[in-house]
């Protein structure tokens, strides 16, 4: 049973990635100064690849695709953001003795719960020793990856978060190597169920994070 952790919900539709990073930095600073409560910011981005500090050059997309590639300060590897993907930035003060990896596990479990309610049985995975970190959420029946997660913490406050594929175009994922895993197959709620909408998905995800 997860401990309660109610969040304040902020919602936007499409926000440019770099503008979102500026706003997120401001939210983090407010949380570090206790000037705002723990917050979940739900939004989407125009098409963009973002790369973590450990992303290999060989995993980057072909520039001819015309989709910008932006370095980011989070953990994790390359990911794609675009319309039809629900991004959740989590600005949360970690509890005493809690690390960012502990919180990521909680994030995975809350998203598994949300996906179950949306009709997609899902699971988190433990990383075998010596393997690339298996952060994120996979579909239980088809073994595809449906959520990417990359987070960091600074002065005990988390930033960045998760990206849940709802009903967007999945083809950009094929232009690069997502999450540092050449064999991973990315999917979306719509791909698994035949249909999905952002309007149905947002409230279920917000509820799973006790966000209002």
Image: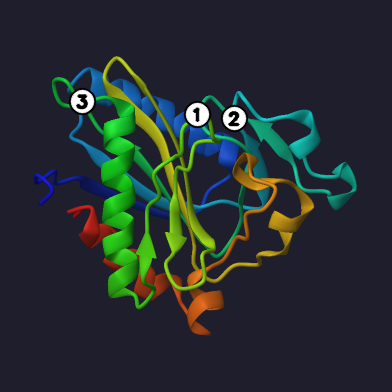
Chain-order first, disc 2 or disc 3: 2
> Residue lying farthest right?
64
Question: Looking at the rendering, which quadrant does residue 157 occupy?
Answer: top left
- Within-10-Å neighbours for mark 1: few <14, some 14–19, many 20+: many
Q: Distance between the residues labelled 3 and 1?
A: 18 Å
- In the rendered view, would you say 114 is above or below 136? below
* Residue 145 screen position, x and y as percent: 52, 58
Q: Which of marks 3 and 1 is in front?
A: 3
- Asked if the residue at tag 1 contacts the one at tag 3, i.e. Cβ–Cβ closer than 8 Å, the answer is no
Q: Is residue 27 visible?
A: no
Q: Judge left or right: residue 145 versus residue 31.
A: right
What number is the disc on residue 98?
3
Could you say which is closer to the camera, residue 9 or residue 207? 207
Q: How far apart are marks 2 and 3 (CA)?
A: 23 Å
Please name the residue that numbered disc 1 is placed on: 74
What number is the disc on residue 52?
2
Chain-order first, disc 1 or disc 2: 2
């Amino acid at each position: 049973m997860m401990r309660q952790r109610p969040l304040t919900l902020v919602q936007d539709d499409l926000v440019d990635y770099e503008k979102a990073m500026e706003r997120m930095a401001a939210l983090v600073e407010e949380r570090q100064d206790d000037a705002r409560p723990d917050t979940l910011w739900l939004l989407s981005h125009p098409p963009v690849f973002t790369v973590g500090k450990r992303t290999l050059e060989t995993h980057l997309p072909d520039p001819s695709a015309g989709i910008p590639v932006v370095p980011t300060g989070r953990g994790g590897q390359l990911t794609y953001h675009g319309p039809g993907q629900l991004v959740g930035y989590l600005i949360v003060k970690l509890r005493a003795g809690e690390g960012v990896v502990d919180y990521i596990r909680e994030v995975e479990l809350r998203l598994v719960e949300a996906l179950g309610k949306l009709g997609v049985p899902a699971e988190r995975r433990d990383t075998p020793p010596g393997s690339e970190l298996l952060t994120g959420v996979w579909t239980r029946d088809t073994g595809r990856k449906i959520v990417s997660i990359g987070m960091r913490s600074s002065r005990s406050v988390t930033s960045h978060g998760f990206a849940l594929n709802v009903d967007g175009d999945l083809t950009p994922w094929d232009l690069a190597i997502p999450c540092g895993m050449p064999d991973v197959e990315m999917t979306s709620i719509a791909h698994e169920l035949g249909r999905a909408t952002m309007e149905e998905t947002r409230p279920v995800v917000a509820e799973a994070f006790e966000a209002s």
